[in-house]
Image (tube, rainbow, N blue to C red):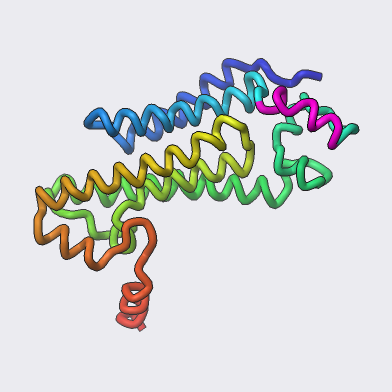
Amino acid sequence: MFQYGYWEIVLINSLIFIIFAFSFVRPKNATDWRVFGTFSAFIIALFTEMYGFPLTIYLLSGWLSKKFPELNIFAHDSGHLWYDILGLSGDPHTSSIHIASVLLINGGLLFLAITWIFLYRAQRKGVVAIAGPYAWVRHPQYIAFIVIMFGFLLQWPTLLTIIMFPILVTMYIRLAKIEESESIKFFREEYLAYADNTGRFFPRIENLRKKFTSHS
């Protein structure tokens, strides 16, 4: 049974995630809009294959039919390709892979909301954001987006989103560097001192030690 063609679900889910992301990103220039547009394309491609038309399953149908002859490749559950490839049995929604993907997606969304709170407060005061997640890394908002996308790849991999994922990660890295250059021009020594003590995407080990030591 061909369990796809639910275009209203594609539309609703895409709008929910895109509007949610837009509420935090608020693109200001052409670079911001390119990154946001690519993220939106990632979301639309994902939900199109999840509920609309399974392009990846269709393109891989010959290989999947030979590799897994008993698999109903066009059943909705078969879209959980990691589950199929690993030869797992049972309901894919209760597997450790699916649970991990849900935790990553929901955790990324929650982390994005938290980072926005601290960034918004700093912007209102006109100061460098150094509280909350920004005390550990300089760009926690982009970490959140990467985690969300990785969670979706873990849950429902498609050829398009697998190709788009490294492109988006690269764009986030470039955007982070652009924002840092702008922050240095605006905040000068204040931001330079912050950047010297805080990692871009990963907490610095020496700072972790200092913070844990100071609280012990």
Image vertical order of residue 51 relative to residue 145, above or below:
above
- Left or right of 124 in this view: 117: right
Instruction: Residue at 30% x, 81% y: name it.
Output: 214
Q: Position of residue 4 (x, y in %)?
A: 69, 19
Name the one closer to the observer, 22 or 173.
173
Name the one closer to the observer, 60 or 149.
60
Image vertical order of residue 86 relative to residue 76, above or below:
below
Q: Position of residue 156 (x, y in %)?
A: 63, 36
- Left or right of 165 in this view: 200: left
Q: Position of residue 90 (x, y in %)?
A: 82, 43
Residue 67 lies in what quarter of the image?
Answer: top right
Image quarter of the N terminus? top right
The verdict on residue 33 being magenta is: no
Residue 175 lies in what quarter of the image?
Answer: top left
Instruction: Residue at 58% x, 21% y: name it.
Output: 9
For the stretch drawn in magenta, what is the main secondary structure?
A: helix
Instruction: Residue at 58% x, 22% y: name it.
Output: 48
Image vertical order of residue 61 relative to residue 197, above or below:
above
Name the one closer to the observer, 30 or 89.
30
Image quarter of the C terminus? bottom left
Q: Position of residue 195 (x, y in %)?
A: 22, 61
Image vertical order of residue 76 relative to residue 156, above or below:
above
Which residues make up the magenta segment? 56-67
Instruction: Residue at 57% x, 27% y: name it.
Output: 47
- Left or right of 72 in this view: 98: left
